[in-house]
Amino acid sequence: ISEFGIAEALQKLGINKINEGTSTGLHNFSSGEILESYSPVDGKLIGSVKMSTAEDYEKTIQVATAAFKTFRLMPAPQRGEIVRQFGEKLRQNKEALGKLVSYEMGKSLQEGYGEVQEMIDICDFAVGLSRQLHGLTMHSERPGHRMYEQYHPMGVVGIISAFNFPVAVWAWNTALAWICGDVCVWKPSEKTPLCGIACQNIIAEVIEENNLPEGISCLINGDYKLGELMTSDARIPLISATGSTRMGKIVAQAVAARLGKSLLELGGNNAIIVTPDADINMTIIGAVFGAVGTAGQRCTSTRRLIIHESIFEKVKDAIVSAYKQLKIGNPLDENNHVGPLIDKEAVIMYAAALDKVVAQGGTILVEGGVLSGEGYESGCYVKPAIALAQNSFEIVQHETFAPVLYLIKYSGDVDNALEYQNGVGQGLSSAIMTNNLREAERFLSVVGSDCGIANVNIGTSGAEIGGAFGGEKDTGGGRESGSDAWKIYMRRQTNTINYTTSLPLAQGIKFDL
Ligand code: NAD
């Protein structure tokens, strides 16, 4: 690991052997138990974090609530200037943070850098947006009246994030929440706590250098119990939660019980439809990267290939032969394509999925298996697998967070493929590979894909920050990042102003005294 500069990266990011898990931007503290973070890359201990107790949480929320009272008064473009500086700090730390993401989470170094680039991109987007938090004006039905709507800062935003995008999800939320005048309290995944510490150290510099109120970006560390304190806390008007559908269903109910708002970014079960008119080379590149990139641990990973029977054998042979080229190993080494799964629990779920697909009637086309021996000491490296399956299999209906790809055959027209594509609980990302305009438009039409993301001639995996990101059904319905996703971080107010000397009522109601 020394050859990849991990020790230098940790030092640059201010990661110690033992780190305080609670931070209000200027103060770091914690009185909880120790959480150890082991790398899935080599199985070694990277560092430890003292977790936040209920008392630490209470202190943090009080500081955040107080910070909101002053931060909301800062004009939005000035808040944009703070986010611009945050983006600059991320540029300075891109290499170190990208390496930590790769080492703690296990994704390839290029993807680690890519994740930090997404943070930089959302900062740039948010800076421009800080001058564009537009409302509408409307014509009043009453003479001498004016109507408009405006967006006000909302308060404390609670961010609960997943292990697989250990830094970008936080930045998507924080950059937008900040320009909207909100303050943030972040609970990173307990599987990637050091990424959380590193990000908070970076943002703390911005807070200090600008004499900003302590508490505008807070960090707490712990497991789901700490998350539960957030979801039931009426002082947090918005909970943005990224993770499994199982978690989202619990979070949604807890937040709804106190009539708070939730922004849910949950699991996917993403498919590429491959029609007789598809460009096979492009299909293979999109499908292989989509299925094995991040070792199949992206919410947008390709899980299903729905292939027309007329080209099924050709596509199957091409993808099986492409899998033979895959190099599995240390993700910090840029010669490798596939890194490890996050932990041994994920390995068990991967192996169980392969057993289940066979038990349910599927056929393995590319054998899976857990790797051992030199370079695979962590026990988290697995072989990407492909199985021939039916869309209706219980295991195919389920999101297995690992590199397992199901090939499904369809016949007839694209509507039959769409029935499979939409015939799962999740609705995150979808794609069609076709050069046929009618098929592409059908896929994008009202009777087409039911997902939040629908792509033509690119795969399902990944997205640009400029668009609103998220999905329907079991994916939770939330939208983050670009377009008008900022609106969920603000409260909308409709204003009617009467500049006459009489008081006409709406709907022509007469009320004479
Ligand atoms: P997870 O659901 O196990 O955990 C996610 C976060 O939720 C963690 O911080 C965890 O501590 C917290 N949590 C768990 N139970 C909770 C509860 N009852 N109350 C409050 N917080 C709770 O997910 P994971 O294994 O870290 O991540 C993988 C999942 O995340 C996959 O399903 C993936 O598709 C999904 N994901 C979705 C998106 C998206 O944008 N749609 C992005 C990344 C990951």
Image (tube, rainbow, N blue to C red):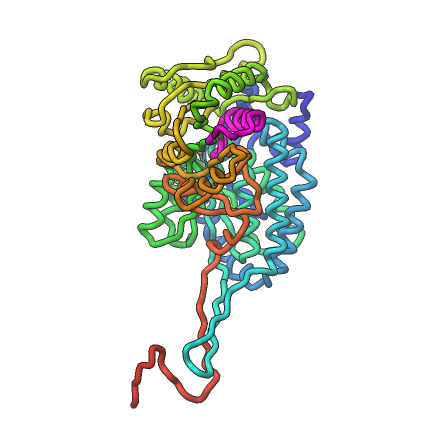
Find the residue positioned furthest to the top. 373
The segment highlighted magenta reads 273-301
Question: Up-down: is 413 above or below 143?
Answer: above
The residue nearer to you, when weighing 323 against 232, is 323
- Quarter of the image for the C terminus: give it: bottom left
Magenta stretch: includes residue 279: yes
Question: Up-down: is 321 above or below 180?
Answer: above
Query: Total number of numbered labels?
Result: 0
Residue 420 locus on image (x, y percent): 37, 32
- Report whether residue 232 is seen: yes
Image quadrant where residue 17 sits = top right
- Quarter of the image for the N terminus: give it: top right
Residue 309 locus on image (x, y percent): 43, 23
Residue 231 locus on image (x, y percent): 38, 46
**Where's ligand 1: which quadrant?**
top left
Image quadrant where residue 4 sits = top right
Relative to 135, is 236 on the left or the right? Answer: left
- Report whether residue 65 is seen: no
Q: Residue at x 46, y 13 (%)?
A: 367
Q: Residue at x 59, y 40 (%)?
A: 199
The residue nearer to you, when weighing 445 against 71, is 445
Residue 340 locus on image (x, y percent): 53, 21
Q: Residue at x 36, y 34 (%)?
A: 419
Magenta stretch: includes residue 120: no
Question: Up-down: is 189 above or below 379?
Answer: below
